[in-house]
Image (tube, rainbow, N blue to C red):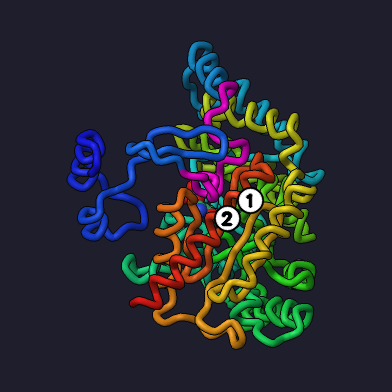
């Protein structure tokens, strides 16, 4: 029996609240889980259930939940300066300090920042800035974007066009013209039975083929996540990114790294492009920038584009009310300070990342598990019908949802992406908590097997 309080919130939610990416009729029948409290790597729902947050909120809570220091910084900043804008030739100290701090964390030359509120806005900013750049460069025809299927870049009209998910396009008459998608370097599905190094090069050449098809003089940029997150933690073979970079340079195509998930230590370095070994012209970031405590996102421009925009004599007529919001920027700065003090920028490539991989890999013997892959503190456990052949369940996605719901019942947030069970825990996760994740995941896998056997 649910408490009266929970039922009231569920009823109000069902009546008044449109959720992201939700079938509302279904949710209204089931009732939303109301999350009321969080601390460290755990969240609690309104019924008092303690759940290990294996997704760090939504890939964002790098430093864990409930840090007193961030609460204090928010309090102090609101009392000092609650809000002022960055329009009309004004700036606030937290925004300036944050930009300077990010410049230290990124490779030399990548040192100019435009702040926004979300990853979607960051990628819409990327699109407009790239178009603006090529206009200033006297190449107004160079406007086509290439990105990848299963790439996730946001929900704005532009960023959703970059996103390579059909279910996000069709209901909204997207993508816009001039947005193109190529295949992704997904060894588990696309690279079956292939040598990984050869497959990485093959997948990179899909980019070259698309550039040649569109004409290099028309192609503005290639936008991609170093590791595709919401697409299912797709980790490309090592050969992929260096070849992509070579192709972009050869055809004068800007290379944009969407680091909304991969940034801020998730893959074992501060930036996903460091882990995967390439040098982007532009980086978009969000989530881990403030560990999700408040909305803030940014686009970082390297010299090539940054210098041109800075030198432009025409107004850069773009930007939002809350660009570099002082409270959000102050929180982001304190979040980065904590990350630096605790070594979280690189912790995932140390012993904890190795332990995460080693322990999760023990799940590979389970009858439902076809593959376990990890990078830093990102992981995917792929479920399949036949371990020997990798044959998937049909329809794809159904078994993943069964497993996800069982995980939550067992006190673990694991996200299902198709039939891949995904993890992205806070970067402070301990060995004991990793053990807890693996134990709960195995129990949930056993129960999934039993449930689908019965079905
Ligand atoms: N890019 C990537 C790689 C993402 O994972 C996301 C969100 N999951 C976005 C962009 C969009 O960010 P937001 O939801 O903050 O708009």
Q: Residue 209, position in %: x, y?
A: 66, 82
Callout 1: CB less than 8 Å from ligand 1: no
Seen from the viewer's position, the closer of residues 401 and 175 is 401
- Relative image position of residue 204 (x, y in whole percent): 70, 76
Where residue 192 sits: x, y (%)? 65, 84
In this figure, which residue is indicated by the disc labeled 1?
A: 435
Disc 1 is placed on an element classified as helix
Q: Residues within 10 Å of mark 2 (few under 14, many from 20)?
A: some
Residue at image x 33%, y 65%? 172
Q: Residue at x 64, y 28 (%)?
A: 333
In which quarter of the view is residue 151 placed? bottom right
Asked whether mark 2 lies closer than 8 Å to ligand 1, one says no
Q: Residue at x 55, y 31 (%)?
A: 324
Position above or below: 138 against 189: above
- The answer to whether mark 2 and mark 1 are in CB contact below 8 A is yes
Position of 80 compared to 13: left or right? right
Q: Residue at x 52, y 32 (%)?
A: 39
- In the image, farthest residue toward the right: 108
Q: Is residue 261 left or right of residue 107?
A: left
Horizontal side of residue 249 vs 37, given as left or right? right
Q: Please state the extent of the stretch shown in magenta in the rendering.
A: 51-69
Indicate which disc residue 439 carries. Answer: 2
Secondary element at image label 2: helix
Residue 345: quadrant of the picture: top right
Classify residue 245 as left or right of residue 295.
right
Q: Is residue 20 magenta?
A: no
- Front-most of 319 and 284? 284
Instruction: Judge whether 158 appears above or below 340 on screen.
Output: below
Q: CA distance from mark 2 to mark 1?
A: 6 Å
What percent of the width, then of the height, locates residue 259?
63, 52
Does 268 sit above or below residue 229?
above
Q: How many marks?
A: 2
């Amino acid at each position: 029996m649910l408490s009266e309080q929970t039922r009231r919130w569920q009823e109000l939610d069902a009546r008044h609240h449109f959720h992201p990416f939700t079938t509302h009729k279904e949710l209204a029948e089931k009732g939303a889980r109301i999350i009321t409290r969080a601390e460290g790597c755990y969240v609690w729902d309104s019924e008092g259930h303690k759940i290990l947050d294996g997704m760090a909120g939504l890939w964002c809570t790098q430093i864990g939940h409930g840090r007193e220091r961030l609460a204090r910084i928010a309090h102090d900043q609101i009392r000092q300066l609650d809000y002022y804008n960055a329009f009309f030739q004004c700036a606030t100290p937290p925004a300036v300090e944050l930009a300077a701090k990010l410049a230290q964390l990124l490779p030399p030359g990548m040192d100019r920042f435009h702040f926004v509120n979300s990853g979607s806005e960051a990628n819409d900013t990327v699109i407009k800035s790239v178009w603006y750049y090529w206009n200033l460069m006297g190449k107004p025809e160079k406007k086509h974007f290439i990105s990848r299927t299963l790439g996730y870049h946001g929900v704005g009209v532009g960023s959703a066009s970059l996103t390579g998910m059909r279910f996000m396009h069709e209901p909204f008459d997207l993508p816009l013209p001039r947005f193109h998608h190529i295949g992704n370097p997904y060894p588990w599905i696309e690279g079956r039975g292939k040598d990984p190094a050869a497959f990485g090069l093959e997948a990179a050449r899909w980019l070259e083929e698309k550039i040649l098809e569109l004409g290099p003089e028309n192609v503005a940029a290639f936008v991609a996540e170093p590791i595709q997150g919401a697409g299912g933690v797709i980790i490309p073979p090592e050969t992929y990114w260096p070849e992509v970079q070579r192709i972009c340079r050869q055809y004068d195509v800007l290379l944009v790294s969407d680091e909304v998930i991969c940034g801020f230590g998730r893959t074992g370095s501060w930036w996903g492009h460091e882990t995967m070994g390439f040098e982007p012209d532009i980086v978009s970031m969000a989530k881990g920038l403030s560990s999700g405590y408040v909305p803030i996102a940014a686009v970082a421009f390297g010299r090539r584009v940054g210098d041109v925009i800075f030198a432009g004599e025409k107004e850069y007529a773009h930007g939002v009310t809350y660009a570099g919001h002082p409270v959000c920027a102050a929180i982001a700065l304190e979040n980065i300070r904590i990350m630096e003090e605790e070594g979280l920028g690189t912790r995932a490539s140390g012993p904890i990342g190795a332990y995460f991989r080693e322990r999760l890999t023990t799940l590979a013997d389970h009858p439902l598990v076809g593959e376990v892959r990890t990078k830093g503190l990102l992981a995917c456990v792929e479920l399949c019908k036949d371990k020997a052949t990798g044959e998937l369940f049909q329809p794809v996605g159904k078994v993943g949802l069964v497993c996800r719901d069982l995980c939550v019942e067992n006190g673990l947030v694991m996200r299902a992406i198709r039939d891949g069970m995904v993890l992205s825990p806070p970067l402070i996760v301990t060995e004991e908590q990793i053990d807890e994740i693996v134990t709960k995941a195995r129990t949930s896998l056993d129960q999934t097997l039993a449930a689908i056997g019965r079905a």
